[in-house]
Image (cartoon, grey):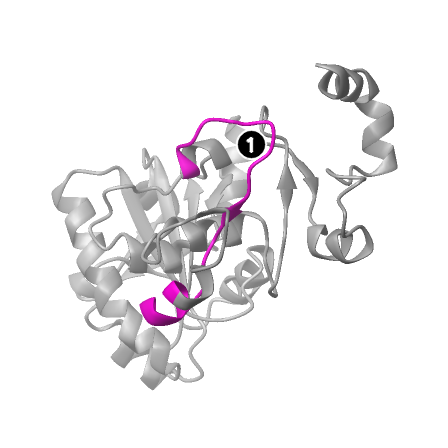
Amino acid sequence: MSSTDYSEFLSQFGGTLVKPSDDRSTSTLSDALAGKKFVMLYFSAHWCPPCRQFTPKLITLYEKLQTDSKSVELVFCSLDKSKEEYDEYTSDMPWLCMPFDATESKKMARKYKVDGIPHLVVVDGVSGEVITENGTEEVKMDADGKQFPWMPKSLNEILQTDSKSLELAFCSLDKSKEEYDEFTSDMPLLSMPFDATESKKIASKYKVDGIPHLVVVDGVNGEVITENGTEEVEMDADGKKIPWMPESLKEIRSDGIQRHATG
């Protein structure tokens, strides 16, 4: 990152940051974030019950990361409605906070596509690029931060399975083991274990916003062939056109398709 790019990254935070644990002292951005490999952005508010439940878990993780000498800092971006609520909510926070009246907090919420709170984003402290927008779920699944900064993995890495000419993996979003066992009892396909946290990671990776949802990916390079597999099955029940490759993609990869068809 050039000095100009880094300045732009810092400028989104405004002028100064507050540290409640240090008698609400203020720090300049260059001092507070200098040399940090990772920066977590925590969008939250006192009026939000799920936020108040999640914050203690995040504090535990943050303190562990600091103890483990991870090069990371967290910035709380307040969406509180009053200064009194902000002061009460931040009083036990060990990290840096945007000031209550900082207009940048809402601007950053839009920039990082915050559509609900609590919302935790992890960004690269050097490049400013987003590493994950699903930090809240990551904390719930990895409370000790063993896999921090939760770098996205390829499908092969997540599933840890060899590529085959065609295979299907069921990623369960069942709420109970009993429902999972009943639902999968007649399935002839591979299934992720009921308690596999990777199922939610895969759902997030492939932007699943409703179920049933079927995605077809290239088993060699992991690229998505179609995200509309559910509709394709309904229109092509015999699978004559599988893998339902879009025409535009067929033109780009025509040579490869022919090799797969004949090899």
Task: Determine whether the residue tagged by mark 1 lies in a helix, strand or loop.
Answer: helix
Query: What secondary structure is the stretch in magenta mostly built from?
Result: loop
Image point (32%, 52%), residue name: 74
Whether residue 44 is in magenta: the answer is no
- Looking at the rendered image, the quarter that the C terminus falls into is top right
**Type of the residue with mark 1:** Thr
Image point (87%, 35%), residue name: 247
| Residue 251: quadrant of the picture | top right
Total numbered circles: 1
Q: Which residues are magenta?
A: 159-181
Q: Nearer the viewer, residue 162 or 252?
A: 162
Q: Nearer the viewer, residue 215 or 142?
A: 215
In the image, taking residue 57 as reference, residue 172 lies left or right, namely: right
Residue 185 image position (x, y, % from top left): 42, 60
Q: Is residue 68 visible?
A: yes
Q: Which residue is mark 1?
A: 4
Q: Nearer the viewer, residue 154 or 20?
A: 154
Q: Is residue 154 visible?
A: no
Q: Nearer the viewer, residue 26 or 117?
A: 117
Image point (48%, 58%), residue name: 186
In the figure, 165 relative to 109: above or below? above
Task: Give the crowd class for mark 1: few <14, some 14-19, many >=20 residues within 10 Å.
Answer: few
Residue 68 image position (x, y, % from top left): 14, 40
Image point (40%, 49%), residue name: 192
In the image, taking residue 90 as reference, residue 92 lies left or right, namely: left
In the figure, 144 relative to 173: above or below? above
In the figure, 181 relative to 250: above or below? below
In the image, taking residue 7 as reference, residue 231 lies left or right, namely: right
Residue 132 image position (x, y, % from top left): 46, 47
